[in-house]
Image (cartoon, rainbow, N blue to C red):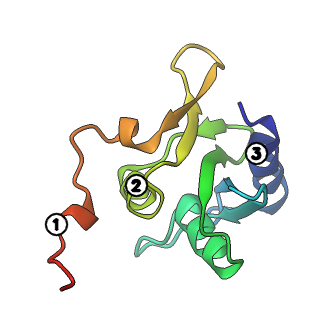
Amino acid sequence: MDHELIEAATEVARTRCRGDNHTVAAAARNRDGRIVTGVNAYHFTGGPCAELVVIGAAAAQGAYELDTMVAVGDRDRGVVPPCGRCRQAMLDYFPGIEVIVGSGEGDGLRAVRIADLLPATYVWSDHQPDAG
């Protein structure tokens, strides 16, 4: 379990999530060990979840090989699972990424491959016309 990653997301949730616009923080570890963090940007029109903000921030920092991600709610809500949209985006960008989620048994946490969070999923790249 990547406790350092959970701690990074928890610290961002504690110190940067303020009010109703920013309520979830996420952190991801790149293959080279770097940790990238972000917060959601809630807006009545939708807005990106913290996991999507992390994907964009990682790209801006040249971190293109994310291995693990976790999201943490503000106000000490702990680890929260990704929504369906974030699961699909993580699968499309990083098909081997693991996501830290609750085990459903008390405070237990586990790392799960993103493909296991989307059984019988649509894989966008499998449905694109050949580039040739």
What's the CA distance linking mark 3 and mark 1?
Answer: 33 Å
Give the residue number, with chain letter if any, for mark 3.
5
Q: Is residue 81 left or right of residue 89?
A: right
Give the residue number, with chain letter if any, for mark 2.
91
Q: Amino acid at mark 2?
A: Leu
Q: Residue at x 74, y 38 (%)?
A: 76
Q: Residue at x 17, y 78 (%)?
A: 130
Q: In which image quadrant can residue 86 be found?
A: bottom left
Q: Position of residue 52 (x, y in %)?
A: 53, 65
What's the CA distance linking mark 3 and mark 2?
Answer: 19 Å
Compared with 1, 86 (above or below) is below
The numbered disc on residue 127 is 1
Q: Residue at x 66, y 63 (%)?
A: 39
Q: Is residue 56 left or right of residue 45?
A: right
Label 1 packing within 10 angstroms: few (<14), some (14-19), many (20+)? few
Q: Give whichever of discs 2 and 1 has the lower sequence position.
A: 2
Q: Amino acid at mark 3?
A: Leu
Q: Residue at x 74, y 37 (%)?
A: 2
Q: Amino acid at mark 1?
A: His
Label 3 packing within 10 angstroms: few (<14), some (14-19), many (20+)? many
Q: Secondary structure at mark 3?
A: helix
Q: Nearer the viewer, residue 132 or 48?
A: 132
What's the CA distance linking mark 2 and mark 1?
Answer: 14 Å
In the displayed orientation, state which residue is furthest to the bottom: 132
Compared with 59, 122 (above or below) is above
Q: Position of residue 124 (x, y in %)?
A: 25, 64
Label 2 packing within 10 angstroms: few (<14), some (14-19), many (20+)? many
Q: Is residue 8 visible?
A: yes
